[in-house]
Amino acid sequence: MLKNKSFWYGNMAFAVFGWLFFIYGLFFTIDSSSMNFLWWVVVLLWGIGHPLEMAFSIPIGKKAGVSLEKTITKTMVFGIMWWIPLKLGVFDE
């Protein structure tokens, strides 16, 4: 499963939906308390987690020959769903 590109692409799509949910919450009121809580969880995970992942993704991207700009962008958008398969050799950038 971890060597399956479709698995990782599916997870990357999930990450994009997370960003869409985040953006939605910035512009529209979320009335449901459980959805509002979930929105804050996403904000914390995406806003704190993705920048912290740079410590892992930058060396992995560099080793794979990926530019620093592309590594930062893909880590901020997809997080571990991008750099783990890159490290495992599933993606060749």
Image: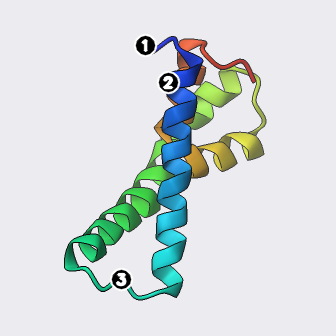
Quadrant of the drawing holding the C terminus: top right
Helix, strand or loop status at disc 3:
loop
The residue at the far front in this view is 32
Label 3 to label 2: alpha-carbon separation: 30 Å
Q: Earlier in the sequence, mark 3 or mark 2?
A: 2
Kindly identify the residue that appears in the image at 56 percent across and 22 percent down. 6
- Give the amino acid at mark 3: Ile
Residue 87: image location, x then y, percent: 55, 19
- Give the crowd class for mark 2: few <14, some 14-19, many >=20 residues within 10 Å: few
In this rendering, the answer to whether 19 lies above or below 71 is: below
Are dots 2 and 1 in contact, CB under 8 Å? yes
Q: Residue furthest left?
A: 33
Judge from the rendering whether residue 30 lies leftward or rightward of residue 27; answer left or right.
left
64 or 31, which is in the foreground? 31
Query: Which residue was labeled with disc 1?
Result: 1
Say which amino acid is labelled 1: Met
At 37% across and 57% down in the image, what residue appears?
Answer: 45
Could you tell me which secondary element the residue under label 2 belongs to?
helix
Q: Position of residue 48 (x, y in %)?
A: 41, 60
Q: Position of residue 52 (x, y in %)?
A: 44, 49
- Residue at mark 3: 30
Question: Residue 21 versus residue 83: which sits nearer the camera?
Answer: 21
Tell me the element at label 1: loop
Q: How far apart are the alpha carbons under marks 1 and 3?
A: 35 Å
Q: Point out the tag, 1 or 3, that comes first from the N-terminus.
A: 1
As drawn, the label of residue 7 is 2
Q: Which of disc 1 and disc 2 is earlier in sequence?
A: 1
